[in-house]
Amino acid sequence: MVLVVCCGTGEAGELKLVPAGDGKPVFLKSGEIAGLSGVTWCGGDAFAAVSDREPVVVPLTLKIGPTGVLEKAAEGVPVRLATRLSDCEGIAWVAAEGRFYVSAEGGPGIQGFGRADGKAGPVVRLPEVFGRARGNLSLESLTFESTAGRFWTANEEALTVDGPVAGPKEGTLVRLQEISRDGRMLRQVAWRTERAGMRFQGAGNGVVDLCLLPGGQLLVLERGFGSGGLHARVFLADLAGATETGSLETLAGAAIKVAGKTLLMDLPSGFTNYEGMCAGPVLADGARSVILVADSGGPGRHAFLALRLSGLSGGR
């Protein structure tokens, strides 16, 4: 494994994202729940993940040490969601409501659910264009940040009206959508992914999760396939000057400026399929903990990778 670490520019200067400790993932033996695809922080050592195999949220205890090392991982009792949505991929904790919000490719849709009982809550009404998603390339990502009171989501690869999927010569255009906590559609901008060295089971290179930080910075996790296996790449998004695309019926051939991107980390991960990302607690030195979760693909072991993001103002 060759890890490439890059730097980006944030409000406080240079941002740096690196693995915590030895850079090796921590594996958690799973029960009957497979396919953890999204992860969210609930405060303290409490996290939660969502399964893309069945509508279930799995409570997690992830004990993160003062330097960001993941010292312990444990799985709680799964909570089944009262929903007809399927292929749940993204998850975001909204503490003020006591709810998890989940994004699903089978719908596609976003809906809130009770933390303790999975009771169905509010449904987020997305722009109709997201109904033009390709199969299994829809709403893979979801993030929420309480200071801003904003969600962000995105389709994994281009909608059918927006152009081709990622290939060896060019990436794919996706739509990043900002949503207020009360469900109003805010900004929508286009994002171009990296190229796909190859395609596997319908996927090439796409946006698999987002992470909105308290300072307003947006991290984007891309997962790509290549001859050497999987790649997880984390980018810092630059939304300034990007064209508002919410009114556009198609991005194909449109004269638009896509969001800027700065590579923070390039992780060749072999067969470890990192699909989920969230910010965790502030560390002793002011850096921010970031957690990646890998989709196990089936019963067995879930992988978690602890990262450190430094250079944010006030540890944010």
Image (spheres, rainbow, N blue to C red):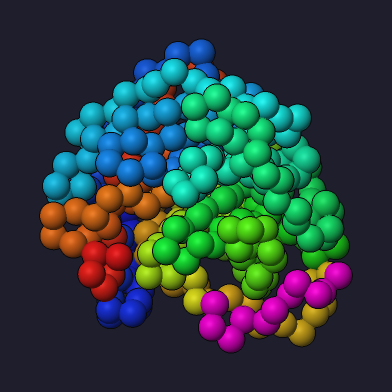
Say which residue appears at 22% left-offset and 60% top-offset.
287
Query: Residue 23 placed where, x, y %?
Result: 25, 44
* Left or right position of 275 against 111: left
Of residues 41 and 122, the one nearer the viewer is: 122
* Left or right position of 22 against 229: left
Question: Quadrant where the C terminus lies?
Answer: bottom left
For the question of whether residue 24 can be seen, the reply is: no
For the question of whether residue 140 can be seen, the reply is: yes
Q: Establish if 246 lies above or below 231.
A: below
Magenta span main SS = loop
* Left or right position of 22 against 245: left
Span colored in magenta: 239-249
Question: Quadrant where the N terminus lies?
Answer: top left
Magenta stretch: includes residue 109: no
Of residues 315 and 118, the one nearer the viewer is: 118
Query: Residue 154 placed where, x, y %?
Result: 64, 57
Given the current orientation, which residue lies at the most extreme top position?
32
Q: How many marks?
A: 0
Query: Residue 33 placed where, x, y %?
Result: 52, 19
